[in-house]
Amino acid sequence: MYNILTLNKISKNGLARFNKDKFAIGDDTENPDGIIVRSATMHDMTLSENLLAIARAGAGVNNIPIDKCTEKGIVVFNTPGANANAVKELVITALLLSSRKIIPSIDWCKTLKGQGDDVPSLVEKGKSAFVGPEIYGKTLGVVGLGAIGVLVANAAHALGMEVLGYDPFLSVDAAWNLSHSIKHINNLDELIEKSDYISLHLPLNNDTRGMINKGSIKMMKDGVRIMNFARGELVNSEDLLTAMRDGKITAYATDFPDDNLIDESGVIAIPHLGASTPESEENCASMASLQLADFLESGNITNSVNFPNVELPKPDGARIAIIHDNIPNMINQVTAAFSKESVNIENLVNKSKGNIAYTLIDTENIISESILDILKKIDCVKKIRVIK
C-alpha cells in the first residue's frame, strides 16, 4: 500500500485515478510515499526519507523546492497542458477587456442606479468615454509557444488577428499544433516592436525575470496592451506603471496582482483565475494522479521537471530503480553488481537530465540483498528502490 498526502483540496474525480486497493490518500497522511499539491508552499516543509515523488496538479512548480528534491532523489512531476484551455479562455477574455474598456463602463453603469427613466439617455450620452478598438486585424505577439501559447495564438488568429509567435525552444509537438498562419519570429525585439498586443506565456527563470522593463517597453508601439497570465515577476511593475502613466502602455491585464497594481488606471487585475475551472482542476488532478501512480508502481517517469522521462513496460519479474549522479562509468559499475551475483539483466534503460540520471533494470530473478548492498556502496547513488 502506498500512502499519498494531499496538501490542497484536490479534485475527487482526479484522485479516483488511484487504485483504492493500492493507495491510501488523505490530507493528514504521515511519512507519505507521494504528495499531490496545487499551490501550497513546500519550501519550509520537512521532506521525509520515505518520500519518493511530488506531483504538482498544475504547470508551475515555484512552490516546490526543486533543488532539494533532486538532491534527495525525489522526483517532481507537473501537468503541462492540463489547464491550457482554461488559461487560454481567460487570456482571450483579457484581450477583449483590455481593448473595449468593458470593466470601467460596467462600473460607470452602476453609478446610474436610481436615475429612473433618465438611464437610457444618460447611457447614450456617457458611452463615448468608453470607446475602444476592435482586435480584428490587429497584431498579437505571443511570447512562448508551449501548450497555452499555441492555443492562444490559434484562437486569436481565428478571431481575425495577425499573430506573431516567439519561442527559441519550440517543441515538435507545439510546432505541429500551431496554425500555419502564425508567423514564427526568431527575434524577440522584432515581435515587441511590431505588436499591438503582447501575451506572455513562458516560465520564470533568471533569463525571463523582469523581461518587460524600461528597455523592452521603449521598443513597443505607443498604446500597446500587455497580457501576463504566466508569472507576475516577468514584468517589472514599477517600469510598467511609469509607462502606463506616460501613455506608452494603454492596458495591462494580469492574473498576478500585487499591491502596486491594484486599483491603477488601465490595469486589469484578476485574482489568479487561470486554472480555476472545474474542468481544469479535474484534468490537472487526473494527470498528476496517473503520473504519480505509474512512478510508484512501475518506476516510469513522465513529465518530471527534475528527472528525465523514462519508460519501460512493467516486467513479469523484478525491477530496480536507481537514482544517481550523471557521471561516466556509472552503468558499468551498476551492471557489474548483477554480473557478480550471476543475475541476468533482461531490460535496462538509462536517461539523464543535467547532472542527474535515472536507471531502470529488469531481471527474471528476485533482486537479492547482496546486489543492493553492492549498489548502495557505489559513489553518487542517491536512491535505490526495488519495485515488486
Image (cartoon, helix red, strand yellow):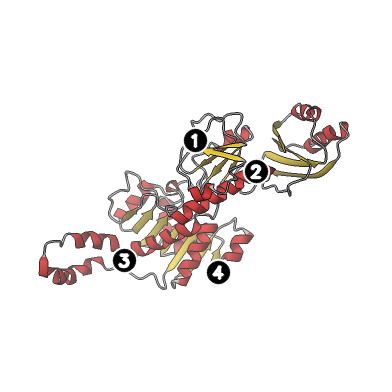
Q: Which residue is mark 2?
A: 295
The residue that disc 4 covers is 179
Q: Secondary structure at mark 1?
A: loop
Three-letter code, disc 4:
Ser
Q: Earlier in the sequence, mark 3 or mark 4?
A: 3
The answer to which quarter of the image holds residue 133 is bottom left
In the rendered structure, which disc, 3 or 2, sits on the residue that comes first in sequence? Answer: 3
- The 10 Å Cα crowd at callout 2, few under 14, some 14 to 19, many 20 or more, is many
Q: Quadrant of the C terminus?
A: top right
Q: Amino acid at mark 1?
A: Met
Say if mark 1 contacts mark 3, CB within 8 Å.
no
Quarter residue 252 falls in: bottom left
Dot in front, 2 or 1: 2
Residue at image point 51% right, 37% down? 26
Identify the mark nearer the N-term, 4 or 1.
1
Q: Residue furthest front?
A: 21
Residue topped by disc 1: 42
